[in-house]
Amino acid sequence: MKKTKRCIEIPQFVENPDTYLKTLTYNGLARRYVKEKHTGGKSWDDIVKRADYELENVIKNNFSNVFLIVSDYVNWAKEQDIPVGPGCGTIVGSIVAYALNITNIDPIKHGLLFEYFLNPERICEPNYQLFFSIVFSNERRDEVIKYISRKYDKNHFEQIMVDTYFGNPKAYAFKNYDPVVFHFPGLRVLDVIKYTEELIHQRGGDYNHFTIENIPLSDPATFTLFAEANIDDIFYFRLDSMKKCLTQAKPENLSDLMAFISLYRPGLMEHLPQFINSKNCKVKITYPDQCFENILKETYGVIVYGEQIIQIIQRITGYSLGSAVNLYRGMLRKNDRETIDKKRIIFLEGAARQGNSLDKANAIFDMLIPPSQYVFNKSNAAWSVTIAYQTAYLKANFPNEFMTANLCYRSLLFDS
């Protein structure tokens, strides 16, 4: 192995970190998308095209080495049998991260956007930070931090420090490039899941090979548990006030769960009845404009995610997703009238080029401002619901083991 001046170990036969990142990514895609690669066609072409686009922008921004470092410590943790979450925050929107085994959520399947994580058209700022947040076992998180400190020491980093403020360590690396923040939140529910797995293995036979990573994602018993609001001890769904709404919503798939937890928040709660009634066919699903149907269909006509607003902006203006993200971020500044007005002009110019009338474009822009202030990031919803579903699956299918694990962690679990 040889070491480059940018602190990641790469095989002798590999030219540089950029080449190594590409190699690992394409190998990972072949592992993640076996069926698509085997059958070929448009779906595989789209997967490769998405990866090529992300790699181009990662490399252009000098972040290849960063992806390799995160991949290194995440995969090291998994090799040590340290529980690692399926992803956390906007990194879940990266297919490169998915290919590298950093995340375990398919961004294409869930319609997640890479531009939310790393916008290739971002307005440059001198202190721009790329933010990597990976959730680890609360009990063994320190082992990961020690591994990083040992491997990537002062010879490789100009500065590394650990900030334990609120118990969430962060490592800050500065390699004469834009600063990068590595965030290491600990989640005790991952320890509960791990212990439940170990108890299931004690059943013997086929149960010896049980792993939470391979559970079916459309298990009827699990969704019955949600529909009946049997949500005690379920990650992210432990609020008693959720129970009535859950029994009304009757979620039937992961998409329903993601929308539910995204709407069950201040600012968007008022739209929850519309979501529930539309989902259950009590009212007709309507769209602000028919061209939004493909974007809002999964949430029954209700704007739930920032990603949906970005896609609507792109649909109306014809701008790239990167430019749409910049427009969206400007719309978040509801108290900054000057910025809002500037973004409106840019929006109207694009809408006009797409053949939209001034009145229609203004109406759509005005419609998007209120939800922009409150909508949830779909990437956050995806990883939160993934862990919630895992705990619900264990409760529904292995209640004794799950309850035993919860009792062991009861005094610690609720502040995770």
Image (spheres, grey):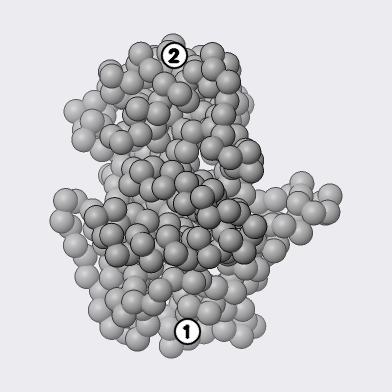
Screen quadrant of the C terminus: top left
Q: Is residue 407 visible?
A: yes
Residue pointed to by mark 1: 3
Q: x, y (%) of residue 260?
A: 43, 29
Q: Tell me the kind of residue under disc 2.
A: Gln
- In contact (CB < 8 Å): disc 2 and disc 1: no
- Taking depth in this image into account, of 240 and 320 the one nearest to the observer is 320
Per the image, label 2 sits on a secondary structure element best described as: helix
Question: Which residue: 80% across, 54% down?
Answer: 42
The dot on residue 248 is 2
Residue found 30% across the figure and 36% down from its top: 267
Mark-to-mark CA distance, 2 and 1? 57 Å
Specify whether residue 307 is in view.
no
Secondary element at tag 1 = strand
**x, y percent for residue 122:** 44, 71
In which quadrant of the rendered view does residue 261 lie? top left
Picture coordinates of residue 284, whole percent (x, y): 58, 20
- Packing grade of label 1 (10 A; few <14, some 14-19, many >=20) is some
Foreground label between 2 and 1? 2
Question: Could you tell me which residue is drawn at 28 percent across and 18 percent down?
Answer: 240
Residue at position x 47%, y 29% from top? 257
